[in-house]
Image: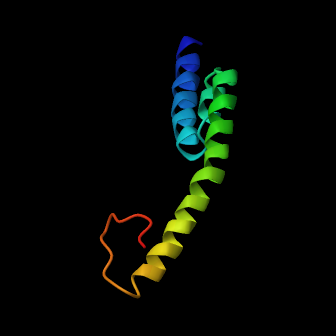
Amino acid sequence: PSHAVQIIVVTNDIVAIIVSALFPGIGHMILGQVSKGITLFICSFLSCFIIYPIIIIDAVMVAQARKKRPIGDWEFFPK
């Protein structure tokens, strides 16, 4: 019986790590840190709404600027 419990725990750890990589916070919930997991999930979800618009604006600005001049690999928000 103790070997079965160890296998389940290890399997859950691996699943939690994989799930956490795909959906931040959900892995923590699987590991029993429900409040922490919910907080991390909400923060990562909300950050998408902040970061994605910034990425889109930068892409538009890079597309416009590269018609006029060369753009550096790490140049952000070119004019």
Direction top: furthest residue: 2
Q: Nearer the viewer, residue 61 or 6?
A: 61
Q: Nearer the viewer, residue 35 or 52?
A: 52
Residue 54 lies, in percent from the top left, at 55, 59
Give the residue at x 52% y 35%: 17
**Picture layout, residue 61 above or below residue 43:** below
Give the residue at x 57% y 20%: 4
Numbered circles on residues, count: 0
Give the residue at x 55% y 11%: 2
Residue 46 lies, in percent from the top left, at 67, 44
Q: Nearer the viewer, residue 2 or 53?
A: 53
Residue 53 lies, in percent from the top left, at 61, 61
**Picture layout, residue 11 above or below residue 49:** above
**Picture layout, residue 2 above or below residue 78:** above
- Image quarter in which the N terminus is found: top right
Left or right, 69 with reference to 77: left
Residue 55 lies, in percent from the top left, at 53, 62
**Image coloring type:** rainbow
Give the residue at x 41% y 64%: 76
**Picture layout, residue 70 above or below residue 13:** below
Direction front: furthest residue: 79
Q: Nearer the viewer, residue 6 or 27?
A: 27
Direction bottom: furthest residue: 67
- Image quarter in which the C terminus is found: bottom left
